[in-house]
């Protein structure tokens, strides 16, 4: 059995992922105690998200949204397979993972935009500074609470994301975390896994096809 | 009287009131002689009505009736160190400070600057505390 | 493909850095991790002269034009006479103006300064929009009607590290109420 190493995650995807993770932790810990740092990292994360969205259309094979954004029915079917421990292994994001990418990006983006609104209405600073004089103290306070709420919701998503990574790593006996560092996954396990699950040859082929033109 | 001078001599020997003595003596000289401690004590307690607010004001308002204990600022509530030199050796040692507070506090309390005689009375009264 | 990726990565970092730089108030001192909200008072004379009657408010709590107005009207200082020796007044004014909110990049200074209209020179910190917004949640019974507090002007009563320039919400202890975080 060959254990061919295949490049799955391009550098931008990996840098994006770990920058976002580090950035989120920093933002969550600093709050407004270190406002300067908090705002700087916030801007950085928003910029990262914009780049990642562009990369979702222009990036390498597994970086593209088209590769991992699936219909709800497909995601649901995947969950059912996971529960029965017979989920297929995907080289890129699996359907649940793909949904989590979108949920996390949306939640982080919303937190960031709300953060800019808080920066405007509470600190009279940033692009929305002018808003500060137009909203009431109570409204400004509600915006701040919304920012905190969505940030906490993002943290919940991060927890679910980590559980998902753990579960998928266990079910397919591979180290997904390491792959996000190195960018590589092992091809052999794909064939093995697909073969065990008794999926048709077609799928195996399509996977190998994917491996060949992974964008490198 | 003998007892008092003994105490004064003792404190002078300790060097605690040497600075105060010189400063106060200089000021008294400029104010044209001796102050009257009893007049100073009387004015200390005398209440003046502030025409703008209608409130009664006296030295006691902030410093209290006992100069040996701390007072409290009427508006901000900030503690004021005791004025009596016997418990607060910093008092009456800095001419600029004395003049600054005479000016401010006479204006606030009495509504005008105090006269030379009034200041002399206060100095002698406070020095004895 | 590799080239394109590195070009995008570099522009990503540059773009974010540019955004931070363009928004100058997010740069400055606090990026270094300083937790202080305003620069602490550094002039002993100021502490002595102003701090003998009230909390020695940091110069960074009002813009320069407010301090100039304040120091020019010490004969009626919120209803009290606070006149100073001319030279002392001059020295203190210079100190206040140099370290005023509009010349500081500390968080609270920046916020207060931006919340004041250009044509205004408030004398009370408590009247600035920034101050009001930050204290809006407090019920009357916690401050004005609280016999142990009475007034918003006594910063140090609740902000226990106010004298060090720290107004952090986590450090608030309202007498009779304790911690206050909302």
Image (tube, coloured by chain):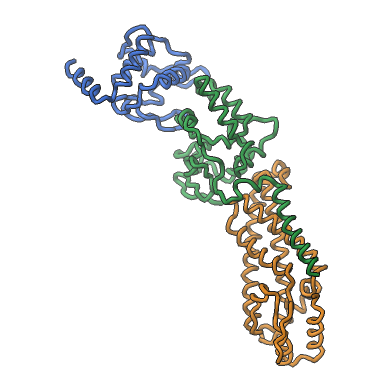
C122 relative to B67 in the view: left or right: right
Foreground residue, C63 or B121?
A: C63
Chain that appears blue: B
Q: Is residue C18 visible?
A: yes
State which quarter of the image contains the N terminus of chain C.
bottom right
> Between residues B86 and C132, which one lies in front from this camera angle?
B86
Q: Residue at x 65, y 82 (%)?
A: A174
Compared with A204, B3 (above or below) is above
Total tally of numbered discs in the picture: 0
What tint does the image give chain A? orange
Q: Is residue C27 above or below residue B124?
A: below
Which residue is farthest top?
B32
Q: Is residue A208 left or right of residue C34?
A: right
For chain C, what colour was chosen? green
The residue lying furthest to the left in this view is: B2
The image shows residue A45 at horizontal and vertical percentages of 69, 59
Quadrant of the rendered image containing residue A20: bottom right
How far across and down, in percent of the image, does residue C181 sit? 54, 51
Residue B91, given in percent of the width and then of the height, sits at 35, 24
Q: Is residue C80 visible?
A: no
Q: Residue at x 60, y 26 (%)?
A: C68
Q: Position of residue A124 (x, y in %)?
A: 67, 43
The answer to whether residue A48 is left or right of residue B5 is right
Q: Is residue A123 above or below residue C78?
A: below
Which residue is located at x 72 percent, y 51 percent? C19
């Amino acid at each position: 059995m060959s254990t061919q190493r295949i490049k799955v995650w391009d550098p931008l995807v990996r840098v994006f992922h770990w920058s976002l993770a580090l950035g989120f932790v920093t933002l969550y810990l600093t709050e407004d105690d270190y406002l300067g740092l908090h705002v700087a990292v916030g801007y950085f994360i928003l910029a990262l998200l914009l780049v990642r969205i562009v990369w979702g259309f222009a990036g390498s094979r597994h970086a593209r949204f088209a590769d991992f954004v699936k219909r709800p029915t497909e995601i649901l079917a995947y969950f059912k397979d996971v529960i029965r421990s017979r989920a297929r292994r995907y080289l890129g994001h699996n359907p649940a993972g793909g949904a989590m990418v979108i949920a996390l990006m949306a939640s982080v983006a919303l937190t960031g935009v709300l953060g800019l609104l808080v920066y405007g209405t509470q600190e009279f600073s940033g692009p929305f500074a002018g808003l500060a004089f137009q909203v009431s103290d109570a409204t400004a306070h509600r915006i701040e609470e919304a920012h905190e709420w969505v940030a906490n919701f993002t943290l919940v998503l991060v927890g679910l994301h980590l559980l998902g990574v753990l579960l998928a790593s266990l079910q397919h006996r591979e180290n997904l975390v390491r792959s996000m560092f190195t960018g590589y996954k092992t091809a052999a396990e794909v064939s093995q896994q697909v073969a065990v699950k008794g999926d048709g040859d077609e799928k195996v082929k399509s996977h190998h096809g994917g491996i060949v033109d992974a964008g490198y | 009287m003998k007892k008092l001078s003994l105490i004064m001599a003792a404190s002078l020997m300790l060097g605690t009131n040497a600075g105060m003595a010189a400063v106060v003596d200089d000021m008294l000289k400029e104010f044209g002689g001796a102050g009257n401690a009893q007049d100073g004590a009387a004015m200390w307690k005398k209440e003046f009505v502030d025409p703008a607010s209608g409130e009664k004001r006296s030295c006691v308002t902030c410093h209290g009736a006992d100069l040996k204990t701390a007072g409290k600022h009427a508006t901000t509530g900030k503690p004021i160190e005791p004025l009596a030199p016997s418990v607060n050796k910093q008092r009456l040692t800095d001419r600029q400070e004395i003049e600054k507070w005479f000016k401010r506090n006479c204006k606030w309390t009495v509504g005008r600057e105090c006269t030379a005689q009034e200041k002399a009375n206060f100095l002698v009264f406070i020095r004895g505390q | 493909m590799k080239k394109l990726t590195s070009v995008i990565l570099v522009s990503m970092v540059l773009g974010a850095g540019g955004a931070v730089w363009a928004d100058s108030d997010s740069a400055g001192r606090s990026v270094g991790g300083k937790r202080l909200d305003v620069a602490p008072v550094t002039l002993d004379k100021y502490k002595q002269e102003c701090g003998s009657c009230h909390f020695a408010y940091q110069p960074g709590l009002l813009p320069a034009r407010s301090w100039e107005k304040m120091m020019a009207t010490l004969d009626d200082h919120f209803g009290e006479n606070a006149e100073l020796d001319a030279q002392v007044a001059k020295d203190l004014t210079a100190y206040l103006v140099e370290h005023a909110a509009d010349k500081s990049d500390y968080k609270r200074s920046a916020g207060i300064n931006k919340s004041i209209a250009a044509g205004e020179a408030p004398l009370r910190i408590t009247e600035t929009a920034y101050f009001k917004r930050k204290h809006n949640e407090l019920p009357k019974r916690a401050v004005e009607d609280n016999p142990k507090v009475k007034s918003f002007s006594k910063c140090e009563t609740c902000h226990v590290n106010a004298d060090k320039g720290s107004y952090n919400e986590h450090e608030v202890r309202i007498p009779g109420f304790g911690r206050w975080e909302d």
